Image (cartoon, helix red, strand yellow):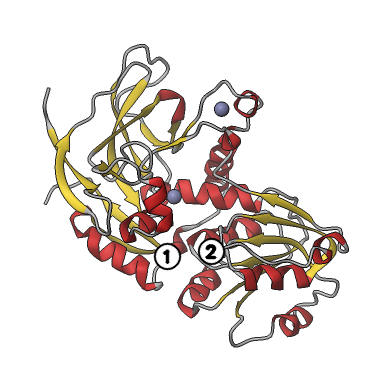
């Protein structure tokens, strides 16, 4: 079989993407072929589009299909796959792990040393079809809006970061109102935090964070965070911090406003090393936890939270056909976007 499909491809080691015809992949033994319904553009895809130093280091074999945030249905089962059926609604964990290392065996696949990433190390989901191992397939209840499931990958990063430490009754500071920070606002409120305050210097995205339920969305270029803490009755500092910006200034500000004994999850990756006064961590007895990817259990938590009433759709700002992907990437690069959803259910 030599059927062709549309795919958004990184054609060469350089900026830009191209809509191309490529062969429909054939599921190998243990793999599943998924027909794509909707995809979402991730910050990672924007790095790859722009061809920044991260992309130049990680995209080793162009031409390749990119994309890793998607929802679709099972189209074909590879040899030996059991327990799944053609037609089932699915998404997929984008990190393919070894199943043998100590972390994989203890259920911590997010720390596998031999991770292969869909849409980075192997062909991705910005196409009419994608192949992944059956063990990475996540069944999705038909009752859940596909536009939301399209970005469960990013929602999973937010869930992993937000739920690392207990939140009930706690005051939470989120630094960085990118899509993941905005989604984290909704999760923290849903999980029982008392106050959720988010900071950024992008007013458009702070507006989205307000729509998601932030108690205060603070533009730190214009407003004084300590003043806002007083107004909100946060006297001893924040109990939990979620660092989503990768900005040294934002991280240092977070350290300065944490309560002694506070806990911080770190997701944002800076583009250069930070200089730190270690006493701002040690003297305050802070706990810092690095976050990478998602735990498999986060998929279960997301499905449960959405079915329990958490609405993360306020982060969606653009919906378009996949042939308009250039517009989607321009929206992401403008900073005036939340999640951009691409529709693959119709041909144009
Ligand atoms: Zn992503
Ligand atoms: Zn492993």
* Image location of residue 216, percent across then percent down: 63, 76
221 versus 98 height, above or below: below
Q: Which residue is mark 1?
A: 338
Helix, strand or loop at disc 2?
A: helix
Report the number of numbered marks.
2
Q: Quadrant of residue 61?
A: top left
* Image location of residue 183, percent across then percent down: 53, 59
Residue at x 57% of width, y 65% of height: 245
Q: Is residue 161 left or right of residue 343?
A: right
Helix, strand or loop at disc 1?
A: loop
* Image location of residue 22, percent across then percent down: 16, 38
Q: Which mark is residue 5?
A: none
Give the image quadrant in which the ligand numbered 2 is located: top right
User: Which of pointers 1 and 2 lies earlier in the amino acid sequence?
Assistant: 2
Q: Is residue 337 left or right of residue 246?
A: left
328 versus 236 height, above or below: above
The residue at label 2 has a CB less than 8 Å from ligand 1:
no
Question: Which residue is more in the foreground, 178 or 252?
Answer: 252
Q: Quadrant of residue 177?
A: bottom right
Question: Which residue is more in the foreground, 43 or 40?
Answer: 43
* Image location of residue 185, percent across then percent down: 59, 62
21 versus 175 height, above or below: above
Asked if labels 2 and 1 touch by Cβ distance under 8 angstroms, the answer is yes
Residue at x 41% of width, y 72% of height: 335
Q: Which mark is residue 182?
A: 2
Q: Is residue 327 left or right of residue 303?
A: left
Residue at x 42% of width, y 42% of height: 143
* Label 1 to label 2: alpha-carbon separation: 8 Å
């Amino acid at each position: 079989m030599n059927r062709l499909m549309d795919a958004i491809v990184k054609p060469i080691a350089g900026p830009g993407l191209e809509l191309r015809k490529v062969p429909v992949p054939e599921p190998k033994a243990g793999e599943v072929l998924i027909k794509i319904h909707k995809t979402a553009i991730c910050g990672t895809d924007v790095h790859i589009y722009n061809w920044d130093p991260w992309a130049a280091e990680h995209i080793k074999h162009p031409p390749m299909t990119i994309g890793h945030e998607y929802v679709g249905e099972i189209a074909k089962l590879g040899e030996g796959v059991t327990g799944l059926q053609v037609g089932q609604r699915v998404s997929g964990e984008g990190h393919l792990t070894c199943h043998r290392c100590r972390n994989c065996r203890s259920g911590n696949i997010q720390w596998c040393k031999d991770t292969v990433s869909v849409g980075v190390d192997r062909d991705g989901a910005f196409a009419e079809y994608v192949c992944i191992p059956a063990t990475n397939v996540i069944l999705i209840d038909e009752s859940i809006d596909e536009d939301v499931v399209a970005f469960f990958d990013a929602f999973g990063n937010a869930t992993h970061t937000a739920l690392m430490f207990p939140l009930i009754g706690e005051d939470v500071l989120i630094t960085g109102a990118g899509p993941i920070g905005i989604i984290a606002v909704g999760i923290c409120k849903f999980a029982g935090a008392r106050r959720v305050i988010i900071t950024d210097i992008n007013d458009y995205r702070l507006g989205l964070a307000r729509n998601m339920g932030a108690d205060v969305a603070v533009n730190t270029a214009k407003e004084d965070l300590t003043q806002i803490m007083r107004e909100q009755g946060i006297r001893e500092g924040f109990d939990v911090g979620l660092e989503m910006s990768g900005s040294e200034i934002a991280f240092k500000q977070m350290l300065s406003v944490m309560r002694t004994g506070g806990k911080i999850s770190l997701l944002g990756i800076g583009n250069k090393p930070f200089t730190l006064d270690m006493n701002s961590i040690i003297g305050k007895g802070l706990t810092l936890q690095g976050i990478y990817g998602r735990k498999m259990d986060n998929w279960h938590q997301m499905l449960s939270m959405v079915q329990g009433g958490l609405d993360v759709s306020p982060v969606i700002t653009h919906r378009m056909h996949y042939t308009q992907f250039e517009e989607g990437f321009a929206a992401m690069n403008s900073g005036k976007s939340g999640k951009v959803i691409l529709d693959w259910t119709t041909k144009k």
